[in-house]
Image (spheres, coloured by chain):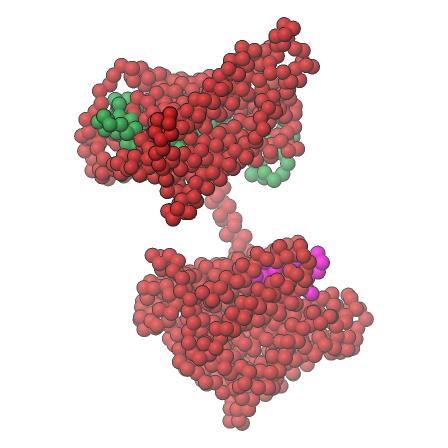
Chain colours: A green, B red
Amino acid sequence: MEALVASALGLLTAAGTYLMLRLRTFPMIVGLTLLSYAVNVFIFAAGRLVTGMPPIITKDAIGYADPLPQALVLTAIVISFGMTAVIVMMALGAFLEAGDDRADMTEGDGQADKPSGGGGAP
Amino acid sequence: MSLALIAALPFLGALLPGLMIRAGKNACAAISGMVTALALLLLGLNAPAVLRGEVVQTRIEWMPALGLNAHFMLDGLGLLFAGLILGIGLLIILYARFYLSKSDPMGQFYTYLMLFQGAMVGIVLSDNILLLLIFWELTSLSSFLLIGFWKHLPEGRQGARMALAVTGGGGLALIAGMLILGNIVGSYDLSVILENKEAIQASAWYLPALILILLGCFTKSAQFPFHFWLPHAMAAPTPVSAYLHSATMVKAGLFLMARMWPVLAGTPEWFYIVATTGLITMVMAAKIALFKDDLKALLAFSTISHLGLITMLLGFGTAEAAAVAVFHIINHATFKAALFMSAGIIDHEAHTRDLKRLGGLRTLMPITFAISTLAALSMAGIPPLNGFLSKELMLEEAAHTVWYGNPWIMGVAATVGALLSVAYSFRFIAHTFLGPVRDDYPSKPHDPGIGLYAAPAFLVVLVLLIGFAPMASAAWLVNAATGAVTGEAVSVKITHWHGLAAPALWMSLAAIGGGLMLLGSHAFWMRIWDAVPRPEAKAMFDAVLGGVAQASRAITDTLHDGAISRYLGIGTITIAAASYWAFDTGTHLAGTRPLMPVSAVPALGWLALVLATLAIMIFHRNRLLTLVLVGIIGLMISVMFAYFSAPDLALTQISVEVVTVILMLLALNFLPKRTPVESGIPRRTWDMAVAITAGAGIAALSYMLMTRDFAFPTIAEYHVANSKPEGGGTNIVNVILVDFRGYDTFGEITVLGIAALVIFALTEALLRAGPANDRLLAWRSDQRQAGDRHPMMLVVATRLILPIALMVGVFIFLRGHNQPGGGFIAGLVVAIALIMQYMASGFAWTASRQRVDYHGIIAAGVLIASATGIGSWFAGLPFMTTGFNYFHLPPLEEFELATAAIFDLGVFLTVLGAVMLSLASLSRIALRAGETVNVQPFDIDPSVDRTLDSEEAR
């Protein structure tokens, strides 16, 4: 079972990295989402995998899964939502401002203070 | 406490002018003056003890582990400097009130001035070199604000930048030097360092430390070759120049040299570096001052010259010379501040300070003439004024100093410096006030009101007082300060007459006679000066700085060319390579932890996840499909959490997944629906190779991690054991979140709230007039629209579900402490319940039917959470300690009430508010893009069985 989780993690990381290396903002956001999954699962897996032992105290429990990574990952999931929302808005804003959703700076983008001079319709 | 208070008062006072300016300029100046006077009073209360020879100390442990303590001490040297800083500060506050014009933001000025004053007082009172360094940097920063106060003047901005670059750079060297010193001694406390002269001077690190510390002092005190920033700082308003360059900023370097004198002085290195630099600075700057036509520039170079004089005296390394240095510090502060203020008055009244356009002001401005003349005569060293006394003593010391085996060179050079000083001082008087009255002044000059001349007049009274009765008026202070510098009791004798045998008498006479002759032939020398080319410091500085800027731009442009995919690629490869190197150089054995068997259902889940991920790689250009696939992956991950004993994570993951996909769908509405093919096969192959490297690395790392047992006992045991008895809950994850690590959670919800507010702010920015707004107004949907925007089935179903969904939310919230659930999950569930209403009936329709706004919910959440934490203080417990108890209320079963639940309520509200605010922001964008607001909850009116037309629906 560990091999399955590890391979899924690797695949998520590879897909996330590949999408992060694309040139448009939307695939980058999706890539970041996949990477967040991978990171969350990785932290969770650092507590080792166990089945049937949720960290809820009961009289007849034989043991508990490590609760600490779970607590860390729980807040990480919520925070990554917040961060995803922010970059989604930034990507949307950039698209609306510039008229395209390229992530890389192109020639002339450095002089950002100057008005963009209209640009094409989206 | 009182010493720390003296240093803190100006900083506290800096808050007041900005507020008091609303009550008028007088109130603004008065409050600054009162704070300064209060600090001066506190200083005065400590003075008797210091004059008895005691060292007053205030010790506050700040970070003892780092050796950084807020230790303050007050000895004679500190008393002298703090008195000068606060006393002249008080005069400057008075002067500036009348000097600044109506259009100058006076509140800002006094705030900067108080900040600067506090930093200076901090330097001279610090008994910890780290603390001293902090104040040192603060003076650089606050003087930057003061010098650049007239932001509209390019000279002001450039001068401020140059001062910051030079003194800030010197400050960096000083930090290094001080740290070396602290390491030699093993303590950062100044009082300890000062007792370790032998250890420091015997250390191999003495010379590097000395050079670094002197770099700091020389840059600050404008010693050659770092003197060039000071004249450019003259672009500041005159009160700033008068303050910074008479008593404070530039004296900080002298102070530090005097402060470190007991441990650094007395070696040949100290003598040759310090005395020589001082001598060169004194003569060179005095020569330049003679040829400056701008009154303030003349005074600027004369200041540099006098700073050089004092530096030279400190460099001599004898107790007698140190006493003269201290005496001259006092005298220079009095006459130079008075002269700067007088120059300001002339500028203020005549609207020029160019000596070529002045002259003949004697009869027009008699009071200013009297003040300036007395101060300038003191600067020239004319008896019986105070400048004469210290200059005579200086010449005496120089005459007895042997420089590299040469007994007379010091004396001659010092006489030349004094001669030049006589010449430029008399030039100040002659070319401003003497001569015929002209008729071409830019403005008809006359004496100002008493507000402007009171401060310089007071200083000139001091000049006369010290000049006529030095033993009564100044000797006690010189004794106390010199005693602190040299570490032994000193009793100076200051007289006007040293006898015919004293070389100083003849050197003085030569200086005065030669100076007057030089002034007489000034026009001749001026022609030579103008004809000979000379290095222009500003041009050199600009060239160096320009070169540095260009070099760094070249590096940045190469490495940071704007292609984010490039940086990410470089970063990924670097991390992978470093990880591989770490793995390769370490030892490695196969894991020993028993593996879990693979069963069919989880394997199917794995297959779904793998297929969805592969499909994303292939179909990522179709963005809608990508979102569907992301949903599948998220679902599988939440199932995985559930399978591997993490019910809370599963609940959180699945609800976050819903909100994320909705959010991205809403955004996608305005984005292109397809990603175009832009990169070629080689680029994609390369990216794929990078991605596979990263993926393989993570897979291998996580596999190795999971197949090993913990190397160290985990802290999980503690949480499991104490969850129920300490935290009062059986859901350990929730107890960790709201109790054990409640502080972390508090930080996290704050971040979440900030993220939501950032989204709100971004939306506001997009909806302002601009290209984004234009695009939105012109936006046409590129998708086919549904004929039935708000289907009745959906509306009815969501209405029915809403109370149930809310009930589920409450249930999950309440049981969270003991069973899977809690504030995070409940917040997400309730948010989803509300979003369903939006989806069914439209955002605006729903929003108009609710009373609270989301900012308020976020704020309430964070406030409730912090109030719960603070509440435990009232029970005498540390921040965020949970209290709980069990209650029995018939007919209910026994139940538990915990303060953690209130904290969790804060979490709940913040999560709810943050999610809703993010989505609401996207809806506002949609409204701007022409989305209509419906008046009915759905588009079909069931009572008449027809579709509402577009007019009704709006």
In the image, what residue occupies the spot 36% across and 33% down? Answer: B887
Q: Quadrant of the N terminus of chain B?
A: bottom left
Residue B135 seen in the current view: yes
Total residue callouts: 0
Question: Magenta part of the protein: which range?
Answer: B98-114
In magenta segment, residue B327: no
Q: Position of residue B301 (x, y in %)?
A: 59, 70
Q: For this view, does A50 lie left or right of residue B85?
A: left
Identify the residue at the far top of this view. Answer: B945
In magenta segment, residue B101: yes
In the image, what residue occupies the spot 49% across and 16% down? Answer: B801
User: Residue B270, located in which quarter of the rendered image?
Assistant: bottom left
Q: Position of residue B208 (x, y in %)?
A: 37, 65
In the image, what residue occupies the spot 28% across and 22% down? Answer: A4
Above or below for B18 versus B219: above
Identify the residue at the far front of this view. Answer: B890
Q: For this view, does B566 lie left or right of residue B505?
A: left
Q: Quadrant of the C terminus of chain B?
A: top right
Q: Position of residue B54 (x, y in %)?
A: 42, 76
User: Residue B62, located in which quarter of the rendered image?
Assistant: bottom left
In the image, what residue occupies the spot 44% across and 73% down? Answer: B75
Identify the residue at the far right of this view. Answer: B439
Q: Main secondary structure of the magenta part?
A: helix
Identify the residue at the far bottom of this view. Answer: B500
User: Residue B517, located in which quarter of the rendered image?
Assistant: bottom right
Residue B657 seen in the current view: no
**Front residue of this view, candidates B626 and B572:** B626
**Front residue of this view, candidates B383 and B618:** B383
Q: Position of residue B91 (x, y in %)?
A: 62, 70
Q: For this view, does B403 lie left or right of residue B575?
A: right
